[in-house]
Amino acid sequence: MSRPSLDLEACRRRQSRLRAAMEALGVELAVLTRMESIQWLTGARVGPLFQPVASIDSAGRVTLVLPSRRIETPAAADEVAPYEEKWLSTMRDASDQRIASIAAWRAACPDMPRRVGCEFSSACKHLLAAADGEWADLDATMFQLRRRKDADELAILAAANEANRAMYQHAREAIEPGINEIDLYAQLHALAVKTLGEPLTYFGQDFRSAARGGAPRDRTAQAGELYILDLGVGLNGYHTDNARTIAVGGEPTDAQQRAWKHIAAAFPIVEANVKPGASCRALFEQVRQQLAEAAPWAFNHHLGHGVGLAPHEGPHLNPNWDDTFQPGDYIAVEPGLYHEELNAGIRLEQNYVVTDSGAELLTDWPLGL
């Protein structure tokens, strides 16, 4: 399949949205050091071993510092400067790379305004020492801006989800009594790589039978167990996250089938209530009340979350936050029920994008046990 990537014109539009947020905060220059934020802003992704820097000023000028061997990476930037990430092919330590990248950025941006913004969660003292003015925290701003998925981002997520579709189809054929969790994990990983035609930038999350979740074990699945697969791949830095549960042996018990029906009934509630401005907390409570009818089987985790350049983003379908849905939110909705009687539980997870009129389902492959 062809490799989808971020559209540089779309990156320029994202830069305009950041500039509007900067103006509201009174920030004249934004300096980004989180790889996810730099990719979102410029389209350039150089991987986790490097320490790039990007900045944008109030006039819209973008300066990007990349490892010297990645200097030709396509990017929506007005100036691209290199830093030395290796010496004679030996990778420099991350701290040394960061010092070098900040020095290159400072050389490219000699004039510092009075008020500068950065992501405090990833800012180091070398960055903060680079300007004498006032620093403002942009972490919350960047996470809020990243919630809205543009068409180029949705295209990457859709392509990545084709690996999930293929993995679930294979799992339904491969899962039978005696299959080893490690063997299935290896099969699924190989299939995802083959489907996408390139190495993955992430692979997770849950690969255990008769367990709520976790990494695969050197263990064989037994007839009557439920095998929860909560799968996610990374493509060009973007993550997928959706789950299915498969009955080992293909014959779920009556209790397991009843639990499945309770969980599946949550999705029409979601689809009827997700719309811009609606409360994520209120939706969580509606689904929790519906699943409480299945007691003593327990629903005791969040209802879902946003997905994108991180596995968990806003909005949070969780009573510990008070988010509301916004157009462009890409959400993973994952109701579940757990109990010893179910051996050990069921989780189903669908992906939606929030549109101006509601929720559009993106993961339309089979849900059944």
Image: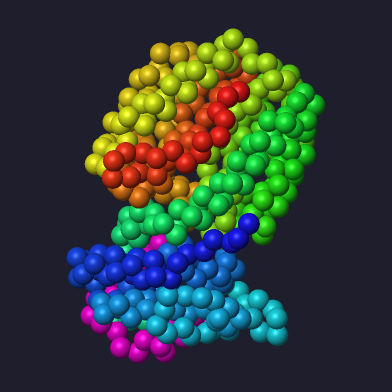
Of all residues, the one furthest to the front in this rendering is 1
Q: Relative to 211, is 57 above or below?
A: below
**Is residue 278 shown left or right of residue 191?**
left
- Residue positioned 27% across, 36% down in the render: 279
User: Taking the image as drawn, is residue 133 in sight?
Assistant: no
In magenta, the rendered stretch is: 98-121
Residue at 56% of width from left, 51% of height from top?
A: 160
Quadrant in which the C terminus appears: top right
Task: Please name the residue shown 60% across and 41% down the image.
Answer: 165
- Specify the quadrant of the image occupied by residue 7: bottom left
- Side (left or right) of 3 relative to 27: right
Q: How is the model colour-coded?
A: rainbow
Q: Position of residue 220 (x, y in %)?
A: 77, 29
Looking at the image, which is closer to me, 364 or 184?
A: 364
Tell whether position 117 is magenta.
Answer: yes
Assign the N terminus to one quadrant of the image: bottom right
- Residue 121 locus on image (x, y percent): 40, 62
In the rendered image, the vertical position of residue 354 relative to residue 286, given as above or below:
below
* Residue 95 drawn above or below residue 334: below
| Residue 286 in sight here | yes
Q: Nearer the viewer, residue 275 or 311?
A: 275
Percent coordinates x, y for residue 27 in the rendering = 24, 72
Percent position of residue 116, x then y: 28, 75
Q: Residue furthest top?
A: 254
Query: For the image shown, how many numbered marks are present on the structure?
Result: 0
Asked whether residue 220 is drawn in magenta, I would say no
Q: Is residue 122 left or right of residue 179?
A: left
